[in-house]
Image (cartoon, grey):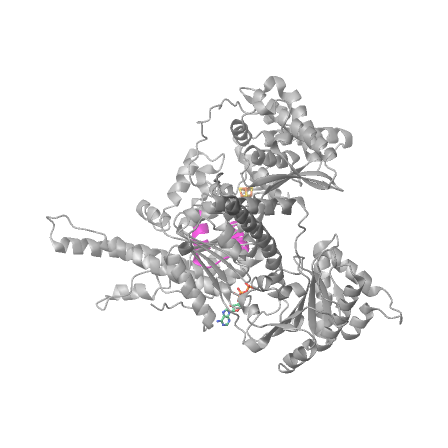
Amino acid sequence: MAHQFHHPYTPYDIQLEFMSALYDCIEAGKVGIFESPTGTGKSLSLICGALTWLRDHKRKEFLKSIDGLSADDDEPDWMLEYSKKERTQALTQKWRELEERLARIRKEEERRKKLAQNPHRPSKKQKTDIVASNDEDDSFFELDEYESDTETGKSVRIPGFSDIEGLSASTVALLDRFKGRVTGSKESENDNENQTRIYYCSRTHSQLSQFAQELRRVTLPSSLPPLQENADAEQKEHAELEEVIKHLTLGSRKQLCINPRVLNLGNATAINERCMELQQSGVAADKKCSYLPRKEFEDVQLDFRDRVLSTVQDIEDITQVGKQLSICPYYAARKVIDQCEIITLPYPLLLQRSSREALDLSLRDHVVIIDEAHNLMDAISNIHSVSVTLDQLRTSLFQLTTYARKFQTRLKGKNRVYVTQVIRLVSALAENLQSLSQKHKSSEAVVQYSDLVSGKGVDQINPYKLTRYLQESKLARKVDGYVEHANNKNDKIASGKETRDKTTVPVLFQVQSFILTLMNPSDEGQLFLNKTDGGVILRYMLLDPTNHFRDIVDEARAVILAGGTMSPMSDYADHLFSYLSSAKLDTFSFGHVIPPKNLTARILAKGVLGNDFNFIFDQRTSDSMITDLGQTIANLCAVIPDGVVAFFPSYDYLNQVLNTWRKPSKTGGSIFAEIEKRKPIVYESNNQKKESNTDDVLLEYSKKVESGSGALLLSVVGGRLSEGINFSDKLGRGVLIVGLPFPNIHSAVWKAKIGHIEKQTFAKLTQNESELPVSKRREAEITAKAAGRDFFENSCMRAVNQCIGRAIRHRNDYAAIVLIDRRYETQRIQEKLPAWIRQSLVSSTSNIREGLRSFFKSHQ
Ligand SMILES: Nc1ncnc2c1ncn2[C@@H]1O[C@H](COP(=O)(O)OP(=O)(O)OP(=O)(O)O)[C@@H](O)[C@H]1O
Ligand code: SF4
């Protein structure tokens, strides 16, 4: 059946295909991978497809809850009919009350202004949130008695607001009551808890804001069932009410905190920790954060929720509402979740189980959409990886021993045992890391867990108990607080004034996160040692994100990965979703909205001076090939109008190319000058001041293009200009990709990643059977090697595809894409390009100039 998607524009054909496929995928409860090139209105396709499904689903659920009512055998039919009517009326009434209230709020601009000067605003005195002033005595930093020593003991956790430390029982009870307010009853609260939601997750804050912007364009029919022919006046009136899309955006404390003294700490960990400190039981009531939801502010809390739901708001709007109402948006937002239809949130909040638990976020039977998912596997690995430096280990060892000495007679219960264990562990890590770094000659090496924790009786430590101790005792917070307190005291004596606020991540927190990961390592993790100019670094890296993401797939109703360039797609079926049957996994690659004549994609295997273009690592330093590359690019710049962007495999290589191009030739000129005759060159460098450098480069480039001189921008694949920046229209009439940007296969990390893939593939093929015939074993080995190579190549081609996708940004855009390397002629590599590029791909030799000239002529 064709669905009506309520798209705010006339949808493009590919949007109709996208929305239908998305609808079916969610309905069937599958995992779907959706590739839709940039500029094809992917956000609206996601919104309209998913929310149309959701409203249809809610309508069906509504009818089910009525039809599900049954009469007892001895009850007459009219009684059942009566109950159904009553139930329909009750549900419709509840719906109406909510929509009317939200509609009223939308109109209450005046009242909002008044609330901005909220009389509840806490006094200056209340806002004071210094946990322990320098005059306070050391006892503040003593550890609470710790006796819990059994594996079964669990800390008590009541879902909801109750996980906010330091709230009184009455406040918790109040907040739980508040949960039911929007729909007015306990029964309705439960209804909402079970209602299906959509979680939309993207990588950056600005992507989430853009999504909210697109969400505002959409109006959907209500989730009430359609009117019957005999509908009465009241029902008709209901039907005329607009059902607003209930949206909430979740963020971190760093984004949502409104307590200036905490927010000014700047650093996310410092803000989190200070916020938690302020909620500790030892902190006097007038020193706690006054924005935490409290009994006196009940009405404000309710206003917060209604105002957030009344229109589609992004994170700044929610922070603003929190400020106007003097209520912490970070905590107050949690109670809006049950009422939402769509929740937007950044990657880490969704992808990390601990973050979901902290927010009390259940994915059970809900729909999860992950946008910009082309680098999802890397993102999951990064979120679950952690590092610590040798210096940090040493500093924390010093802090821990200082603390232990100071408080040794006051360490109660099991504290003494566990503090000693932590000291032994950190000391072993520091010593072993030091000797391992001397033993390994290379700058990067794989490190074994057993080598790191050997000696000092670390093998006697029970990792489970120690992990629990670290989490529950708040040792890191106490030690850090004491160290800062002691430092402040000394500095004050020396200088006679207060010292600085904490702005950096306390060392012990970093060490603690490392220990927590080390105590519970995942089978797919690996430890690495790096020697850098800044010292020795120990890294724990998650090599394979499959199992971490499987949690989400198992829990959710449907999971959608969407992106502009998801190709090559084979990694999803082969690795990330290898446990799914093919019936459960759908992949879609949609074409572009441009007509075919707006794109030309060429492979250039030979230069104008006759060199074979083969930029493999060992050959790419050849002066003659680099010179030929320059001359070829100069020729291309002569026929491609306006802006041309060339992507190189690395910053080092780009520097080398520039050096060669600048060398004077026999005639006195240089390749650099030769190119500049056609277009001025602007280039990206691996500068320390990264952001400003990127902005300056872009500004210079666009100014030159606008001035009419055109320009050639030299950039790096996977570099700062390859993602998130649009080279639309004149800014990118040509995109040149020089070589294939393979990662360094000799690095310890890539060796480990490929090794892991080979091992997994081999195990899958042989089912770990030891009795396998030699020929079968050999076959499995060859296939495993091919899987490793494929994974490596896919990583490279994902980066290439990202760059290519920068050029065509809308329906009337046109551009030429030139892939400069003979390896692009192989079928295996071409298959990894997005379908819409592959279709227009032409292998060019001598006639490329003519081809491009007539392509651009047809667009004049
Ligand atoms: N059918 C349509 N007709 C006209 N404009 C549309 C249509 N669909 C979407 N748009 C608009 O096109 C613009 C680009 O859409 P959008 O940002 O969603 O593209 P995208 O494919 O998601 O790109 P990106 O990969 O950068 O996220 C938006 O302003 C959107 O409102
Ligand atoms: S409760 Fe909210 S406003 Fe207060 S410190 Fe914590 S995050 Fe900031």
Up-down: is 567 above or below 859?
above
Count of marks, rendered view:
0
Residue 220 shows in the view: yes
> Of residues 211 and 445, which is closer to you in this image?
445
> Of residues 179 and 620, which is closer to you in this image?
620
Q: Residue at 37% across / 51% down in the picture?
A: 182
Q: Residue at 55% across / 62% down in the picture?
A: 565
Q: Is residue 434 left or right of residue 513?
A: right
Q: Position of residue 223 (x, y in %)?
A: 34, 60
| The N terminus - image quarter | bottom left
Q: Give yes or no for residue 725 being in the magenta stretch.
A: no
Q: Position of residue 413 (x, y in %)?
A: 53, 19
Q: Is residue 693 left or right of residue 373?
A: right
Q: Position of residue 701 (x, y in %)?
A: 72, 67
Q: Quadrant of residue 516?
A: top right
| The C terminus - image quarter | bottom right
> Of residues 633 and 714, which is closer to you in this image?
633
Q: Quadrant of residue 847?
A: bottom right
Please give the range of residues in magenta. 301-324
> Of residues 222 and 513, which is closer to you in this image?
513
